[in-house]
Amino acid sequence: MNIRKSFRETVKLLAFVLPAFAFYSLFVLVPAFGGFYYSLTDWNALNRTHNFVGLSNYIEAFTEDPYFIKSIWFTLKFVLYMVVLQNVLALFLALLIENRKRTKTWFRTIFFMPNMISMIIAGFMWLFIFTRVLPKIEILNRTWIGDPRLSFFAILIVSLWAGVGYLMIIYIAAIQSIPGHLIEAALIDGAKRMALLRYVKLPMILPAVTIGLFLSLNSSFKVFEAVYALTGGGPGRATQVIALNIFEEAFNMSNRFGYASAKAIILFFIVAMITFIQLKIMKNREVQA
């Protein structure tokens, strides 16, 4: 009897899980394994046939493609700036807004609103601001898109503007979940604002910091739309990120889909490795806190 009941429960659970697993396999696992297979071939998407070339695409990416190496270093620099600035700014805004009782809802809406705009549209909107609006202001009249150094900061500004609101909401939720009696006890003991933040609030919201770092790491490595709309990777490929380099290789330059797939697999392993290290470090700190 128990065996029949257990069998029926298992069938019910599978009935719920299998449709979702089928869609996940169709749209995630199959393309992922297909991409890995094509990374070992010379497929160009125009011919039905392709040849198995082994690891030559991977070797070429690291030894004969200076633009790919350059895009890796540029992306790592962008990720470093984005992860630090985005999380610090989001946490600062969360703490600032949380203390404003009357205008809290308005500020939440204002800072979260950029998340509702497509990044490609936001990129073109900011392109207009950088090329048409800022040149009319003397102190900001710079070659924002034509200068490689300023182009980097232009991309950074747009990405921060678009992404900081989402992390801010996560940090606000984490701050609100701190038990009130802990804050009251710290205030009774005479803790000032900075001591309260350092010894009570920050340790209590470390899980949210882990999530914030994880999300900003992933989104920064995959940045594409803002760069494509603002600079197109220029001037002179100076702002070409890895995702744009892969896109150019597959669709605009030589249709070398096999080679582009190899670069995408390399990007996957870079993101997976750095994310694993980040999660390992943060989880250890959560335990200590």
Image (cartoon, rainbow, N blue to C red):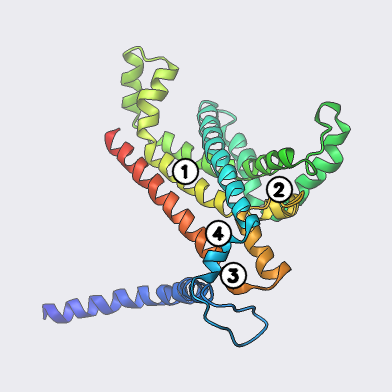
- At label 4, the amino acid type is Phe
Dot 4 alpha-carbon crowd within 10 angstroms: few under 14, some 14 to 19, many 20 or more: few
Name the residue: 72% across, 68% down: 253
Residue identifier under label 3: 259
Q: Residue furthest top?
A: 190
Earlier sequence position, callout 2 versus callout 4: 4
Dot 3 alpha-carbon crowd within 10 angstroms: few under 14, some 14 to 19, many 20 or more: many
Viewport quadrant of the N terminus: bottom left
Name the residue: 44% across, 56% down: 272
Between 4 and 272, which is closer to the camera in this rendering?
Answer: 272
- At label 2, the amino acid type is Ala
Between 108 and 76, which is closer to the camera in this rendering?
Answer: 76
- At label 1, the amino acid type is Leu
Query: In front of the other: label 4 or label 3?
Result: 4
Residue 53, label in figure: none
Dot 2 alpha-carbon crowd within 10 angstroms: few under 14, some 14 to 19, many 20 or more: some
Residue identifier under label 1: 213
Query: In front of the other: label 1 or label 4?
Result: 4
Circle 4 sits in a helix, a strand or a loop, which is it? helix
Between 122 and 157, which is closer to the camera in this rendering?
Answer: 157
Residue identifier under label 2: 238
Residue identifier under label 4: 62
Label 2 to label 4: alpha-carbon separation:
18 Å
For residue 187, side relative to residue 6 (left or right): right
Circles 1 and 2, Cβ within 8 Å, touching? The answer is: no
Please determine whether, in this image, residue 199 is positioned above or below residue 178: above
Label 3 to label 1: alpha-carbon separation:
31 Å
